[in-house]
Image: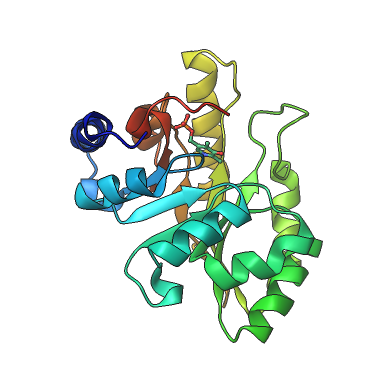
Amino acid sequence: MAGLADMEAISRNVLSIRARIADACRRADRSPDEITLIAVSKTFSMAAVEAAIRAGVCHFGENRVQELATKCTEAPGHWRGGNRTWHMIGHLQRNKARDVVRFADFFHALDSSRLARALNERAETEERVLPCLVQVNISGEVSKFGLHPDEVAPLFDEVARCERIRVEGLMAMTSLHAGPDKIRREFRNMRTLFDAFPTQIAPNISMQQLSMGMSRDFEEAIEEGATHVRIGSALFGERIR
Ligand SMILES: *Cc1c(COP(=O)(O)O)cnc(C)c1O
């Protein structure tokens, strides 16, 4: 993943994904400015990240804290004084809360009040506010992380007391083996859940961002209202692990 050919492929892929985002926006009567493309660089090298940066990508996503810490030390995010934005998009164990608070600009996988309290405590120590999204299990798959839709409002009661956390919206992943109809339904259910909340729920909780859509389904996600799409393999190639 370090050869010149691969680097050229990444910049071509960035262009084609941007074009597909623009097309999906046109179909949905939205502006591409509303969409944040997060390049999911997990398992890929810094050279790949740099190639995406050269192609104009500013947002990166990782699902392991250690890998995020390593990469964002080399190409710092806003919180570390740089000009990238590093998104921690994967499930987090509470004992890793400190590293997320130290390194990430944004956390997409808030899914329990215990985790909220742990992040809040760490953010207090680091003297910062951590922007988060609440992960919802929209697929109904037992193995998936995220809250049942009915559990989201109760979590907000807890988060309202966590001043160092700022919830800006929701995040979801569609079922791994779902066909197009089911994926579409899951995105619509997410959008319905999102719209059912008031825009401002508490001083530190608002519904502005909807992170959904990956390589295989980001166009449908945009048509259904996504503001953040998380794209890995369509940009960087197939992952080995
Ligand atoms: C890996 C990952 C992605 C990107 O998946 P692709 O299919 O490679 O685009 C998006 N979101 C999360 C949470 C991930 O872990």
Residue 37 in view in this figure? no
Q: Is residue 142 visible?
A: yes
Rendered view: 202 above or below 104: below
Residue ID at (22%, 46%) = 32
Residue 62 vs residue 219, the one in the foreground: 62
Residue 177 appears left or right of 111: left
Residue 111: % across, % down = 71, 52
Q: Is residue 149 left or right of residue 197?
A: right
Classify the position of the N terminus by image quarter: top left
Q: Residue 238 appears in which quarter of the rendering? A: top left
Badge count: 0
82 vs 111, nearest the viewer: 82
Residue 184: percent from the left, percent from the top? 47, 23
Taking the image as shown, residue 209 lies to the left or right of residue 55, namely right
- The reply, left or right, for residue 93 in relation to residue 227 is right
Residue 113: x and y in percent read: 78, 62
Image coords of residue 69 (percent x, y): 55, 61
Residue that protrudes farthest toward the front in the picture: 3
Residue shown at 45% from the left, 74% from the top: 79
State how the image is colored: rainbow
Q: Split into 4 quadrants, where in the image is the C terminus?
A: top right
